[in-house]
Amino acid sequence: MAISVFESAIYRDLYRDADMAALFTDSAQVRAMMLVEGVLAKTQAEAGVIPQDSGFFIHRAGMEIQIDPSGLAAQTAATGDPVPALLAALHKALEAPEHAKFVHFGVSSDDILDTALVLRLRQALKLLEKGLTDRAAPMTDVTAVLEQLRFLRQPLLQLRLAGPDGQLTDMGESGATVRAAMAAGLGLTDPVDAASDLRQTLRDLGTWLADAATLLSHSKPSAERIALHTVLRQHSAALHATQGQPPAVAKSVEQLVLPTMFMGLAAMLLQTADHPQP
């Protein structure tokens, strides 16, 4: 038996939504982090925070350079943080130290990781919303589930940019300009004064995923749907158990359970399409 049914050659077609799976790969995470770094550099250049030629060079490179995720494994294992490994690989690939020194200027690893995660979750939620609308629309209470999702988007889809010791925020007007432009460039909102707690928002998202799974499991029970519903409920409980724990613990739990929760609900929607509600 494979570690995960979503990656199993035997069970993959029973449980796996290919579009959703594409969002939860190492390559997708690297691309999202590179996008955030590139947009950061571009907006900083436009605001005069870093040299213009460096900002535009980094932005272009962020869209063109391909970084092998496996090359980040050793350093990530040593530090628990993939961003320094990504930056080392990016500096090497740029082959331009005069520009590379402005990569990641004024931000922290958490800024990049959290903003990149939000970007991927935005796409994942679009897939789930479409699936619920197209495949589960006849079901009772699906409207309420979709309304809850729309309510969750506001606190989730925010730019996560504080910088080390608030460095970017402390840049004054230029820092505010960078934040606003970066949020616009990434299609996020800029919560300068009242950023939501992302860890709590993800716990709320876990509750929503489990509630949506409950709706689907009750619509037409099957062994697979009941099993997936059970897993989502357990994973939601694991997310909520991180409340009061250090952020590093919460992030580790999120890495372990969020991909499975999204894949599980997507699988339930695929099975709903195969068994339409009468």
Image (tube, rainbow, N blue to C red):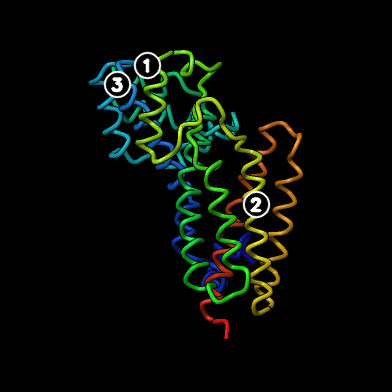
- C-beta proximity under 8 Å, tags 2 and 1: no
Q: Quadrant of residue 106?
A: top left
Mark 1 = which residue? 174
Q: Position of residue 20 (x, y in %)?
A: 48, 59
N-term-proximal mark, 2 vs 1? 1
Mark 2 = which residue? 206
**Quadrant the C terminus occupies:** bottom right
SS at mark 2 in the image: helix
**In this rendering, the label closer to the viewer, 3 or 1:** 1
- C-beta proximity under 8 Å, tags 3 and 1: no
Asked whether, in this view, residue 142 is left or right of residue 23, the answer is right
**Quadrant the N terminus occupies:** bottom right
Q: Position of residue 139 (x, y in %)?
A: 59, 75
Asked whether, in this view, residue 211 is left or right of residue 30, the answer is right
Q: Quadrant of residue 227?
A: bottom right
SS at mark 3 in the image: helix
As shown in the figure, which amino acid type bears the numbered disc 1?
A: Ser
Residue ID at (57%, 65%): 143
